[in-house]
Image: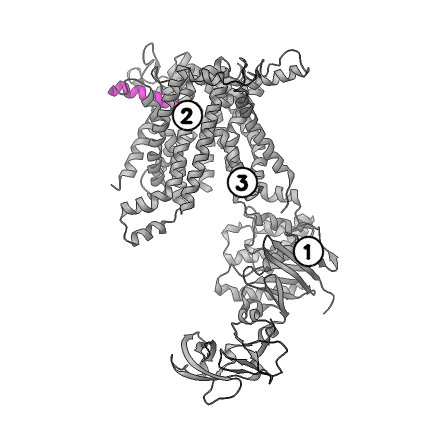
Amino acid sequence: MSRPLLSLRGLSRRFGETVALDRLDLDVPPGEFLALLGGSGSGKSTLLRVIAGFEAPDAGQVLFEGRDLAGVPPHARPLNMMFQSYALFPHLTVAGNVAYGLRREGVARAERHRRVAEALAMVGLEEFGRRLPHRLSGGQRQRVALARVLVKRPRLLLLDEPLGALDAGLRERTGFELRALQRETGAAFIMVTHDQSEALALADRVAVLEQGRLVQLGPPRAVYERPATRFVASFLGGANVLEGRPDGAGGLDCPLLGGTLRPAETLPEGCTACALRPERIALRSGASGPNTASGTIEEVAFRGDDSLLLVRMPGGAVLRVGHAEEDGAPPPRGSTVQLSWEAAAVVPLLG
Amino acid sequence: MRRLPLLVPVLWLGLLVAVPLLVVLVLSVSWPAEGVPPFNLPGVAGLNGDSFALVLGDPYYRAAFLKALVVAGATAGLCLLLAFPMALGLVRAAAAWRAPLLLLVLLPFWTGFLPRLGAWIGLLRDEGWINHLLQAWGFIETPLPLLYSWPALFLGMVHAYLPFAVLPLYASLSRLDPVLEEAAADLGAGGFTVFRTITLPLAAPGAAAAFLLVFIPAAGEYVIPELLGPPSAQVVGRVLWQEFFQNRDWPTAAALAVLLLLALLIPIHLFQRLEARS
Amino acid sequence: MRRSLFPRLGLLLGLLFLWLPVLLLAGYAFSDARIPFQWGGFSWRWFVALAGNERLLAAAWLSLRVAASAATLAVVLGGCIGWVLARQGPFRGRPLFGALAGAPLVLPDVVTGLSLLLFFVLLEGATGWPAERGATTILLAHATIGGAYAAVLVQARLATLERELEEAARDLGAGPATTFATITLPLLAPSLVAGWLLAFTLSLDDVVVASFVSGPAGTTLPMVVFSMLRLGLTPEINALAVVILLLALTSAGGALLLLRGVLGRR
């Protein structure tokens, strides 16, 4: 990794009893698209506000290119933030909103006009400069907010749920646009989201937050396929988390499942749970031994490209099992099925 | 049964608001008379334009209008100047403090208008509290003529109307999303620039409402100029009162009322438009 | 967030400006001195004098009666006006209705007073009623003004009240009257209480309109106080101010508790 653009060192922040950030360390290299993924109350928005300077950390440092930003007020920080509500100034036109930050820098009039026009063109709103924000659609507002921060050419942009207020249909397209703009400008993006598919689709790296702690950091594929903790496993893609006891032969004896989970490599010391993704479980009759089990189908939910089965295991666990459409119609409710999976699908969890 | 809630207010407003205003209009073109009531309706002798001619032609009446508008404008401006930091202070106060502080601002309104004016009389008059203190400390030997002066008039006006100005400003400032101020800071605006470019423009409708809410009643004020003001503070409210009660010239009083109303039509219209928008 | 000193200082100074004269007035009400605002030792004498002032007591009693009835009438009237403005949909003459409903809020007191007096005089000429102006005419005038204020509060509350609440009640089997009594009225209660208090206060505070529409038979407390103030301040007025201040504080406190109770139960 090259020299980090932003480094967070041991950041902590409490609000009364609740811990929003708990000794958090994170490095972001220049030009990276990082997604901060977490549920509500995970501290992800607080983290953005601490970086932007709206909240002061109780402990720890925010370093920008090695320089400590402690005591630097928000308006003097070399980074910008796109707010969840967009925070467009209702009394200024679209162009006025976009020009606001340039005025504060004292950019000369001609240069300002040029850059505002450029920024509006970049988000496809050339025609809308004279409009007031309340006369724009949700998607247009989002792009004004984006133009307003990008026009300042920040090296680091913080985005608080940038797609959260958009309709489902608009979200995918806007996500791709966001990604393209990030590549085009070369700025580092830190995007807060609670939507795992958004994080996986857009980011170079995903940081998963739980109760103010960074629980896993890595490329989307790695985080998705090798979740480190129970929380990450169930939060991303709804993996089955199975508790058990090491059987001494490299596997996890799992009474709730009524079978044994055996990962490809040996089970690490002290591991008492494994994750198993629904789509990695196959219905196969006649299978036996480790990494197989049988149960009764309790529910079948059709999801378009596949079906989700809830399978009640003899030990009491209810397994989520994906059933692809190309394998034909799933067995009916109430039927007993044999399940099996590859050793590589079993992911030992360490927390 | 369903029509009752419509019928009651229509009849009431028609009888006790619309008709009385029409009566004032009719009275303003009636003939003065000796007797009770001291006028003859225009039916017998036709319209009488004398009252309007008098009020519009005589510099005394014209000055009364001018003084009333200047007093109202200055009062509203002073109230705004005081109320803005107060409303800002209220909005920025900790949540737990906001309600009690707002109550403290509004409560003087409940403590009676006349007792408050009484307090100013007690403070300002020759043997009053301020003169007493100044004499006791040896700053002055003879009491200053504080009461019955223009400053006394404005003190009383601002004191009476200040809560009216705080309320709409507070309402518009508390509607202002603090995220907008944060966004401005994020884009590079320092504290005062945020105030100048975001807070102030967004509070402008509230400030306009506050100004008008004070200006409109202040323009017709009678009691405060009468109790605190100098004899020269012959504003239109006072003149109307004198025409009516002392001179018993009801048509002239009515003409003054009609013209006062006309002068206030534009501010009233602006105020109602502002109210409709928020 | 930034905590700048300027707004807090402004609030403090503004509150001092609003309260200092009133508090001084209240403090000196307990002074034995004959001249108001001079300290002559603690004494109740001006309260005793107040209690013996027949003219003031009669005027206060009249004022309280007028204010209470005017406020009650104002709440009914304002409730109807607010209802029409918020719920009656478009009808012919609605702009005029809106203007008339708002007129008492913006008309200068001298204009309201003069117009109502002239109306009463002409009405008496035409119908013989009201034969004598006094409590009744003041009551009608104050109910009109108070009603306009109550209407604003009711309309604002109705506008934010979700119609779905009433529709849900209808769906669950409540008729229009039951829905009104069990859903709408309880939810409107805080506005109605606030409207009553506002109308009551406006009535107790009014000197201009009352002076116009009253006759020799009706002298309200503010009219008496006004004529006393014209002649100069007396210590009795200080004492009276304390009584009014205490009344205002208890009624405001009571209203606050009442509103909190009504709101808390939701």
Q: Residues within 10 Å of mark 1 (few under 14, many from 20)?
A: some
Q: Chain of mark 1?
A: A
Q: Which residues are magenta?
A: C113-128
Q: Look at the numbered discs 2 and 1 and tell me whether their residues touch, using CB distance below 8 Å.
A: no
Q: Label 3 belongs to which residue? A: B98
- Residue type marked 3: Arg
Q: Are marks 2 and 3 on the same chain?
A: no
Magenta part mainly helix, strand or loop?
Answer: helix
Q: Determine which of the numbered discs, if any, sits on residue C204 in the image.
A: 2
Q: Chain of mark 3?
A: B
Task: Tell me how far mark 1 sits from mark 3, CA to CA.
Answer: 31 Å
Q: Look at the numbered discs 1 and 3 and tell me whether their residues touch, using CB distance below 8 Å.
A: no
**Percent x, y for residue A345?**
56, 80
The answer to whether A142 appears left or right of A102 in the picture is left
Q: Is residue C116 magenta?
A: yes
- State the SS at label 3: helix
- Residue at image position (66%, 11%) is B141
Q: Quadrant of residue A196?
A: bottom right
Q: Chain of mark 2?
A: C
Colour style of the rendered protein structure:
one colour
Q: Residues within 10 Å of mark 3 (few under 14, many from 20)?
A: some
Q: Label 1 belongs to which residue? A: A59
Task: Tell me how far mark 2 sits from mark 3, CA to CA.
Answer: 28 Å
- Residue at image position (72%, 58%) is A63
